[in-house]
Image (cartoon, rainbow, N blue to C red):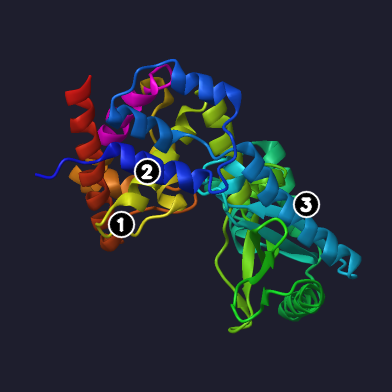
């Protein structure tokens, strides 16, 4: 068996995190210098590390520039929010792009059928507090939007394309769900996504806020997709990681970097990695050293791969979707990822 060159792998990750070779912050440099690392320990350390803050700040600055151009260009009735791994600091590339959501404020979609069904069913109503029932009653009483919502979204998309095409040399408008612009000064790409708000029962009874969902507009089909809840996911990842002194995010970054180095087919992304790691009871790892997290990840993935009951029951961070149920190709990808994690774990055992 060919021995893994962890020093080389670590250098590849480091260059991906820091492509412009900006000096590490002193705190992290001191941290690396303070311990005598074996090659596999060094790789794990680097693979769990966050991208340098200056890179993340540049990605956010590129997003803010796009937002300001859209506003100064005359875009109205819109709220801007960000989504994606940059907002949880779990991205693993220094030159990470950022998703800017342009959300229409002219209307919002809501689960009105569910609201009416609950209010008309005493057995379902008893599952909610009186204050929550009151919020549903208010929602039910609100008038229905009389405009043409899809036309509003199409206009928002076309106006955004017009404004950004006049500002950016590189502005790709052919994708159905996003406009991609390239800020050449900051060396960052920004994906502008047109969407509308969506409120399900959970959002309504929790005063909306971070519980609000979105539906993304598709220019080609002139329709919207199913609801996503990115802000709740971002909030939960950030809170849980703060409670564990950053350990949750270390595990997520580690899995992303393992996928990046693997020659196996691992068709998983942030959605699955977040769910896998968030599902782990924080009491199992909140006081562990970074290298001990590999064993926790190994046990978690092995457990999911070994039991249909467990894999079918795993839900997304926002609680809205089953991650692996009815998706055998994703589960096979997870089994391939398990091979990578197990290899690192075994090499770690040998080095300690």
Task: Specify the quadrant of the image occupied by residue 190.
Answer: bottom right
The residue lying toward the viewer, choosing from 313 and 87, is 87
Q: Residues within 10 Å of mark 3 (few under 14, many from 20)?
A: few
The residue lying toward the viewer, choosing from 251 and 312, is 251
Q: Residue at x 37, y 43 (%)?
A: 255
Q: Name the residue tied to disc 3.
A: 138
Tally the marks. 3
- Residue at the outermost left position: 1
Q: Quadrant of the C terminus?
A: top left
Q: Which mark is residue 266?
A: 1
Query: CA separation, marks 1 and 3?
Result: 46 Å
Q: Which residues are magenta?
A: 285-300
Q: Name the residue tied to disc 2.
A: 255
Q: Position of residue 201 (x, y in %)?
A: 61, 51
> Decide: marks 2, 3 in contact (CB < 8 A)?
no
Q: Position of residue 339 (x, y in %)?
A: 20, 45
Q: Which mark is residue 250?
A: none
Which is more N-terminal, label 3 or label 1? Answer: 3
Which is more N-terminal, label 2 or label 1? Answer: 2
In front of the other: label 1 or label 3?
1
């Amino acid at each position: 068996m060919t021995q893994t060159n962890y020093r080389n792998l670590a250098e590849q990750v480091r260059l991906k995190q820091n492509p412009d070779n900006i000096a590490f912050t002193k705190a992290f440099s001191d941290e690396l210098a303070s311990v005598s690392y074996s090659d596999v320990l060094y790789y794990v350390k680097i693979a769990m590390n966050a991208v340098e803050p200056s890179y993340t700040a540049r990605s956010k600055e590129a997003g803010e520039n796009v937002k300001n151009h859209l506003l100064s260009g005359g875009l109205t009735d819109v709220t801007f929010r960000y989504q994606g791994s940059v907002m949880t600091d779990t991205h693993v590339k220094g030159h990470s792009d950022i998703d800017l959501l342009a959300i229409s404020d002219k209307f919002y979609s809501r689960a009105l059928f569910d609201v009416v069904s609950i209010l008309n069913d005493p057995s379902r109503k008893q599952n909610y507090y009186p204050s929550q029932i009151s919020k549903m009653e208010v929602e039910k009483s609100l008038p229905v939007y009389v405009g043409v919502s899809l036309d509003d979204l199409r206009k928002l998309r076309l106006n955004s394309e017009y404004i950004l095409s006049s500002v950016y040399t590189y502005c790709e408008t052919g994708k159905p769900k996003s406009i991609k612009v390239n800020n050449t000064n900051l060396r960052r790409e920004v994906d502008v996504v047109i969407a509308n708000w969506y409120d399900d029962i959970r959002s309504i009874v929790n005063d909306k806020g971070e519980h609000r969902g979105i539906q993304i507009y598709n220019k080609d089909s002139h329709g919207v997709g199913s609801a996503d809840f990115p802000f709740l996911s971002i909030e939960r990842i950030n809170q849980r990681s703060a409670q564990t002194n950053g350990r949750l995010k270390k595990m997520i970054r580690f899995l992303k970097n393992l996928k990046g180095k693997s020659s196996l087919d691992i068709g998983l992304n942030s959605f699955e990695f977040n769910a896998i790691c968030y599902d782990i009871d924080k009491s199992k790892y909140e006081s562990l050293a970074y290298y001990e997290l590999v064993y926790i990840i190994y046990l978690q993935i092995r457990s999911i791969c070994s039991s249909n009951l467990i894999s079918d029951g795993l839900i997304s961070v926002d609680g809205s979707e089953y991650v692996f149920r009815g998706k055998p190709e994703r589960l096979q990808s997870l089994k391939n990822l398990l091979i990578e994690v197990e290899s690192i774990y075994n090499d770690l055992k040998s080095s300690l």
